[in-house]
Amino acid sequence: MQLLNKISHAAGLPRSGASWLGLLLAVVLLAGCKKGDGINDSIPAPAAVNRLAFFTDTVTVRTSTVLIDSIISSNNSGLAVGRYVDPLFGTVTGRGYFSLTLDSPLAVDQTQVYDSLALDIMSDNYRYGDSTVVQRVEVHQLPNALRTDGKFYYTKDDVPYNATVLGQRRFRPGNKVKKLHIRMSDVLGQALWNAGQTNQLTQQAQLGRYLNGLALTPGASDNGAILRFGAAGVLRLYHHTANDPATVLTYTFTGGGSATPHFYHLETNRTGTALAGLTNFRQSLSSMATGNRSFLQSTLGVYTRLEFPYLRSLNQFGSSLVLNSATLQLAVPGAAPNNAIARLPVIGTALTNRSNQLRAPYSSNPGAMSPATVIPAVITSPQTNLPQATYTINLFSYVQAVLAGTIENNGLLLSPDVTDRELMFEGTALGNQANTAAPLQFRIYYTRIVE
């Protein structure tokens, strides 16, 4: 039988010290079980009973990687821009798009002279990839306006942009906040200036005749970092009066405000990686085909699915079985660096269906402020004796509900805990049960009541 081919119990010799611990835990937890706890409802109450404590860690768990529909990218203030070749997830490219508003009517005094046009954009200190190498940001013009119908843009959405580069900046991101000042094409600058001279830019509706918006793109061959730029870029039209060239005057066009359309597009080329076969949304790729690993990555929608195909075999014991605990531990392959926790995602846990869709959140952390999330921890690996990052998920209520027949045994989806308003790329691999360096472990402690 694939479920209980390895057990320890009170009637025989335990196979290890862990089994004695399991027996002790089972007996202690038994005292806390009450009538009305699901599968324990029909336990008989004779004058004398034998309690046999069992422990198993050979319950089959199937893991796979699932590609979930892309997330909304138009309802936040950040734009993902850059190109990074990730050894696990492939080449990730981010492009940002935003419209602009006319801050005030552009009424040009005939004594004024055009100087230049420049775009100022600001990145925060978030970096995904290698921030030590030189990379580029290029600016292009949008031939069409972004929609204003209230519908969201998603990370999978894309729009055309003109091939002509209006301006570009080469820079080394580093790990600090970065402000970029990008000199723009005088062709666009002069067109805006000429429109102002003829009173053609006095209201917002007129701006689209000359400028529908801008696209921020990385260099085509960059291998640096994805940066998080603010959508509120500022386009500055510099000029001066003819008799006072030393005094700089400015008209501004502001992007990314609450009423100004903006979003970012993400695409991933997984060629040459273990996930090359992951091509369709809601597709499931077995961990057996990806090096005994499943994967998680936040903004790209890469999730891990857990399935327990033989879990209901425990029902062979009927109402005499009392579930004491069920805990699953997932390990990250490789030794954990000193900053491992900061670089790993918090995991969200949710029920799923046969189509790999997210259903109700699963309370894997009962009593906590975020009951459906699990944070990573670092332990000493029993396999290598080195620090290893792990996630521990409490599956007691899931196992109990499956055995009681109150939920379908469709398993769980593990998602990087990311909301639509965040832009985070933290990801990781997780070992399956066959992974010798980072094995998945599922431990169930239970008690049998025998008259």
Image (cartoon, grey):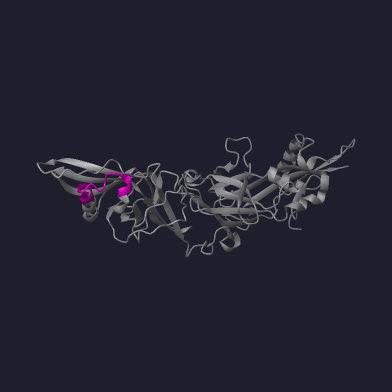
Q: Residue 94: give x, y in percent of width and height.
A: 40, 54
Q: Quadrant of residue 324?
A: top right
* Residue found at the far front of this picture: 199
Whether 74 is drawn above or below 156: the answer is above
Q: Is residue 238 visible?
A: yes
62 displayed left or right of 89: right
Q: Is residue 200 located in the magenta-colored stretch of the structure?
A: yes
- The quadrant of the image that shows the C terminus is top right
Q: Residue at x 83, y 40 (%)?
A: 43
Q: Quadrant of residue 86?
A: bottom left
Taking depth in this image into account, of 334 and 423 the one nearest to the observer is 423
Taking depth in this image into account, of 32 and 135 the one nearest to the observer is 135
* Residue found at the far right of this picture: 47
Q: Is residue 71 located in the magenta-colored stretch of the structure?
A: no
Q: Residue 68: give x, y in percent of width and height.
A: 55, 54
Q: Is residue 438 visible?
A: no
Taking depth in this image into account, of 116 and 101 the one nearest to the observer is 101
Q: Residue 399: give x, y in percent of width and height.
A: 71, 46
Q: Residue 27: give x, y in percent of width and height.
A: 76, 38
340 displayed left or right of 441: left
148 displayed left or right of 115: right
Taking depth in this image into account, of 261 and 432 the one nearest to the observer is 261
* Residue found at the far left of this picture: 243
220 displayed left or right of 58: left
Q: Residue at x 76, y 58 (%)?
A: 1
**Total numbered badges shown on the rendered structure:** 0
Q: Which residues are magenta?
A: 193-206
Whether 365 is drawn above or below 61: the answer is above
